Image (cartoon, helix red, strand yellow):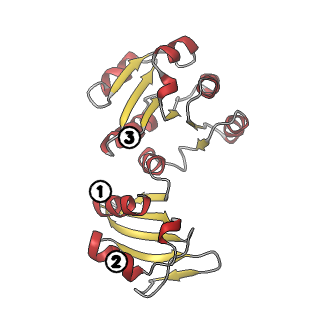
Amino acid sequence: MKRSQYAVIGLGRFGSSLAKELIQLGYEVLGIDKSEEAVDEMSEVLTHVVAADATDEEVLRSLGIRNIDCAIVAIGDDIQSSILAAILLKDLGVKQVVAKALSELHGKVLQKLGVDRVIFPERDMGIRVAHQLVSPNLLDYIELSDEYTIAELSVPKRLSGRTLKELDPRAKFGCSVVAINKRTSVIIAPTAADTLDERDIMVVIGTNQQIESFENEVSR
């Protein structure tokens, strides 16, 4: 199956951290920034990097942006450019458009434009967002340290009715389900006999690699 392709527009602190993490996760990333310096810094890291104005429709067309599965507008401090880039990406038919908001008002404008997801950098780190973008079942992702992660994973329909013993994340992947958030209650320190239902939320702790392996199993 073809892996999703991403474009990150704006390679500042947030955009570059998100783009690097997507690369780490094995995805192709096109980086776009007006700054030659920012482009040079990322040229050895990303799949493709271009110094270009993302508010120019012809430039975006020439880059084949409509073939990108998900474009993230991470423009630093220029609200007008952010809004224009988001409008163009939607008009050009990019499947999923995600945009960084600099304020609540900016976020409301982006939502009105039909942006699929609005990110507030104060609340969302680039690394966390990268993981959420590539896994539909990953609801939240927090690095506890360089090695350990805690993640929230939504239970898909195919795992409904399975017990934790059947899933056995500890033995198969090395990670532990420390809580199950059900619609009416939360089970803390669940036992092997506890049953999962569709849309339950599993709170999982483990190393980054363990979480990623378990996440892949849940999402497949």
In the picture shown, does residue 39 fall above or below 20? above
Asked which quadrant contains residue 19, the reply is top left
Q: Residue at x 56, y 35 (%)?
A: 95
Left or right: where does residue 86 sit relative to residue 65? right
Asked which quadrant contains residue 18, the reply is top left
- Expressed as whole percent of the image width and height from the top left, the position of residue 191 reads 42, 87
In the picture shown, does residue 36 fall above or below 10? above
Residue for badge 1? 146
Mark pair 3, 1: CA separation = 26 Å
In the picture shown, does residue 164 fall above or below 63? below
Residue for badge 3? 3
Mark pair 1, 2: CA separation = 25 Å
Nearest the viewer among 206 and 167 is 167
Q: Disc 1 marks which amino acid?
A: Asp
Q: Secondary structure under badge 1?
A: loop
Q: Disc 3 marks which amino acid?
A: Arg
Crowdedness near tag 1: few (<14), some (14–19) or many (≥20) residues, C-alpha within 10 Å:
few
- Expressed as whole percent of the image width and height from the top left, the position of residue 205 reads 37, 69
Q: Disc 2 marks which amino acid?
A: Asp
Image quarter in which the C terminus is found: bottom left
Nearest the viewer among 107 and 158 is 158
Mark pair 3, 2: CA separation = 28 Å
Between label 3 and label 1, give the one nearer the viewer: 3
Residue for badge 2? 168
Evaluate whether residue 155 shows in this view: no
- Going from N to C along the chain, the mark reached first, 3 or 1, is 3
Evaluate whether residue 112 shows in this view: yes
**How many labels, in total?**
3
